[in-house]
Image (spheres, helix red, strand yellow):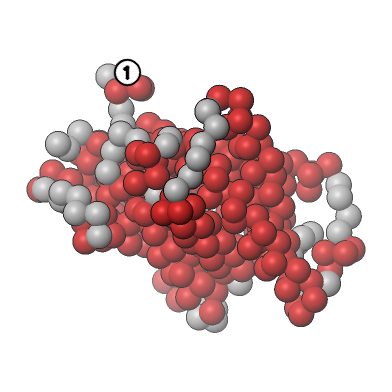
Amino acid sequence: MRVRDYPLAAPLLAAAIWGGMYVVSKWGFSAVPPLALVFLRAALGAVVLLPVVRATKPARDFSRRDVRGFAALAVLLAVSLSAQFVGTDATTAAQGSLVTVLTPVFTVALGVAVLGEGFGPRKATGTGLALVGTALVLAGQYGPGELAGGAVVGPALLVVAAATFAGYTAFGKRLIREYSALEAATYATALAVPLFGAGALAEYLLWDASVARVTWTPALLAAVGYLGVVSTAAAWYLWYKGMERADASATAVAFFAQPVVGVALGAALLDESVGPAFLAGGAVMAGGVYLVSTAD
């Protein structure tokens, strides 16, 4: 099977990119406050995407309905990423990975209930297998104390992030069909930048003025570049690209790969140990994703 014939290839690549994002963002919080970092991420993503759209797509006359649609996506993005970054800063890696699993669950529910997408036996079986496989990976990597410890604010924010990103996924479907994955991702990102800027300003004025004392080392610049160019501009486009050819509920299953890739990167780059549960869970997850991607 050719890559271009595999409808979940693009969102799987996006999920793989996001698998490494948590390590980078968690490290970045030691130098830049969360809302300032997410503003830099979104602004850089918009700076990369807008010239590409202008060079490759025709000029558009948007209806009021479409402007409202892009604005709604921008609000969902702003809430999702702000909650994600603040929540990630306030949680352990174990909690962050576990709550990430809720994103595809919310998206499948929206796809079926709001968009009227089909959810036949093959897709249901594949989704269930992907969920079980990812749970096996996380259970083998983290103990119950790591999952349950800490305050509830951080995990609660990550639940909000998961639900709103599910909305960004599902409600972007109409605009992707009307325009393209590239345009939908770009316009939503650009409209979200002022919202992220307002959050960063509030963070600076009300909670954390340390952004004024940031030391911009080459490593920190590289981290912000990764977050803005790779995990925002490239990954958001890839995520919506998958939805050009697949339902929101099918695309969502690719998200289960994110924590699996994160654990694998930890083993490869940080010498973290993985056991049989990772191999078994990864195989089950991959089988589930294959079933969904080949469902009618």
Q: Residues within 10 Å of mark 1 (few under 14, many from 20)?
A: few
Residue 164 falls in which quadrant of the image?
bottom left
Tell me: residue 221, above or below residue 138: above
Front-lying residue, 200 or 100 = 200
Q: Which residue is mark 1?
A: 2
How far across and how far down the image is residue 281, in percent?
32, 48
Q: Could you tell whether 108 is left or right of 120 in the image?
A: right
Residue 292 percent across, percent down from the top left: 22, 41
Residue found at the very far left of the displayed protein: 121
User: x%, y% of residue 203?
Assistant: 73, 72
Q: Residue at x 46, y 70 (%)?
A: 160
Q: Point out the image quarter for the C terminus.
A: top left
Q: Which type of secondary structure does the marked residue at label 1 adopt?
A: loop
Q: Position of residue 117 (x, y in %)?
A: 20, 50
The residue type indicated by label 1 comes to: Arg
Q: Is residue 131 above or below residue 271?
A: below
Q: Residue at x 37, y 54 (%)?
A: 171
Residue closer to the observer: 197 or 17: 197
State the count of labels: 1
**In this picture, is 126 found above or below 149?**
above
For the N terminus, the quadrant is: top left
In the rendered structure, the answer to whether residue 208 lies left or right of residue 5 reads: right
Viewer can see residue 194: yes
Q: Residue at x 25, y 60 (%)?
A: 114
Quadrant of res 290: top left
Q: Using the rendered image of the protein, determine whether residue 136 is visible from the camera's viewpoint.
A: no
Q: What is the quadrant of residue 247 in the picture?
A: top left
Q: Looking at this view, name the residue that lies furthest to the top.
A: 2
Give left or right: position of 118 versus 161. Answer: left
Q: Nearer the viewer, residue 220 or 162?
A: 162
